[in-house]
Amino acid sequence: MGIERMTYEATPTNPRGSIHIHEASFLYPTHTGSASPWATKENTQPLTQTYEHGLHDITFSCPPGSTTLLCGPSGGGKSTILRLINGMIPLFHSGTLSGKIRVNGTELPYDSLNQAGELTSTVFQNPRTQFFTTHVRDELAFRAENYAEKPENIDHAICAGAEKMGISALLDRPLTHLSGGELQKVACTQAYIAHTPIIIFDEPSSNLSPEAIEDLRLLLQKLRNDKRTLLIAEHRVYFLRELVDQVLRIDGGKITHRWSGNEFFALPDQIRHSLGLRTLKPPSKWDDFTLSTQNHSSHTATRADLAAPVLLQKNSPTATNSPTSHAFDLSPTSPVSPEALILTDLEHAYQHQQVLRIPSLHIPAGRVCALIGPNGAGKSTLARILCGLREPSGKRSTIQWNGRFLNARERQKHSAVVMQDVHHQLFTQSVTEEIHLGKDPSVSASDIEDLISHYQLTDVETRHPQSLSGGQMQRVAMAAALARRAHIHIWDEPTSGIDARHLQRVAQQLTELAQAGHAVIVITHDSELIDACADHVLLLRSLKDISPKESQTVWLS
């Protein structure tokens, strides 16, 4: 299989910013066996290579200045299409490519990534993975410096782009000090000042708070006004209403449905559910909950205390009524008291800047507790402390589990975490090996098979975890966490990059863990997940937004 090479200049029929894909197919290579020089003779298997479809006969066009949304299930082929257009296939991801792909009047594949970078810019799902420097200004200059642009032109472009995209105040900040939403803005500004006619977004909203998603929407509108051609792969789609011109649903490497933007956002809920699509309307904005003045100093508050009565109803299964569908025994290895996790005088600071101040907090076992709050409030820092990856800096800080005070090493033993950036916790050569790694001795091979089946990973169980889609990697990490049989489960943005069906599956799994007696904490910005499974909602406020006498945490339900 091959592709006939044709190169031509942009013309009125193939103008700048156009994308034309005709009957494109791509096969990913897969490998089985072992070629390790340290493997024993008994464990060594011949290394063989086969192929599996990433795309199959894809045909569509994107007119210049248009916005196209790619939706559909995780692993369906959305990211493969993006890689095809930005040159990552086949220049970085090898395989077998056929069909005709024209981007900006150039027949693909590109001659080099250097050529690809002149025509397309990409904003990744996790912007941290695309940064090369330490500070915002340096990062914005990085691309232009590699293309040998004049320093004065680079500086002018950075200042103008930062003002246009609203990040002038961030220019001299270290990237490590920025929130997820701020990092996303920097990545969007990078794409804007690159002046490429086409900008690609891969799950840009997956790790953002509702406020940051609204900022992202405004940035996308600015790019549309600038006549850029935008191609967006997303599961969380409600914020794109009135921004997209066409919508393509990708499943099994094929285009299964096509709509105009107006047709897509007019779909009835019954059809949307049948296609596994997330909500098309803005969901409940839990982060927008505001407490009345008299409750600001209170440790707890009910929904009746909140300023948005329209959000009081919550259609979610309770931990006591939700059916159990998992064959794997989820029970903790020892009995747990209902009031299991107790934090006292918890404080933490980074370089003398305090980020956590929690005088007292009780997190019950047997319930799903959703931890919400703005980007940068300290939610992930709290998670790291609870699971033993970091010690609190406060001298009087204590953490109790089931009546016992725990140090960091003991907390690691009792807890399992699914990280927001799941790449950091995948270490082995296959999905099956990853779930085996660190498992509790009581977990059998048949238990591992059950977890693989439950998370719909059977078709990729021999694949390298890092070669999977974002949603698939997330599910591998979830299965591995369950295999540890920990008491405390902390899931950080578990619905990042997954479709509606898998969101419901995650909600069910969290509920089942709570039913089994675990303490379950889910850090999320996803209102759909909260509505689906949360028994309690805990707001973690930014210290800069409260007085020194106030607690950083407030129970909303």
Image (cartoon, rainbow, N blue to C red):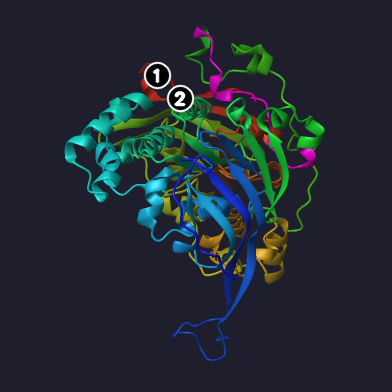
Q: How many numbered marks does the figure carry?
A: 2
Q: Residue 232's spot in the image, x, y percent?
A: 55, 40
Left or right relative to 90: residue 442: right
Foreground residue, 83 or 416?
83
Q: Quadrant of residue 233?
A: top right
Callout 1 amino acid: Asp
Foreground residue, 440 or 473?
473
Number of residues whose C-alpha sits closer than 10 Å to that of mark 1, classed few (under 14), some (14–19) or many (20 or more): few
Foreground residue, 28 or 324?
28
Residue position marked by numbered label 1 in the rendering: 545
Q: Secondary structure at mark 2?
A: loop
Foreground residue, 487 or 379?
379
| Residue 191 visible in this rendered orientation of the protein | yes
Magenta segment main secondary structure: loop
Q: Residue 146's spot in the image, x, y percent?
A: 26, 50
Q: Are marks 2 and 1 in contact (CB under 8 Å)?
A: yes
The relative height of residue 308 versus residue 441 in the rendered view (above or below) is: above
Callout 2 amino acid: Arg
| Residue 394 visible in this rendered orientation of the protein | no
Q: Residue 204's spot in the image, x, y percent?
A: 51, 39
Q: Quadrant of residue 50?
A: bottom right
Q: Quadrant of residue 493?
A: top right
Instruction: Give the residue at x 67% y 69%.
Output: 444
Instruction: Give the residue at x 76% y 34%.
Output: 317
Q: Which residues are magenta?
A: 273-293
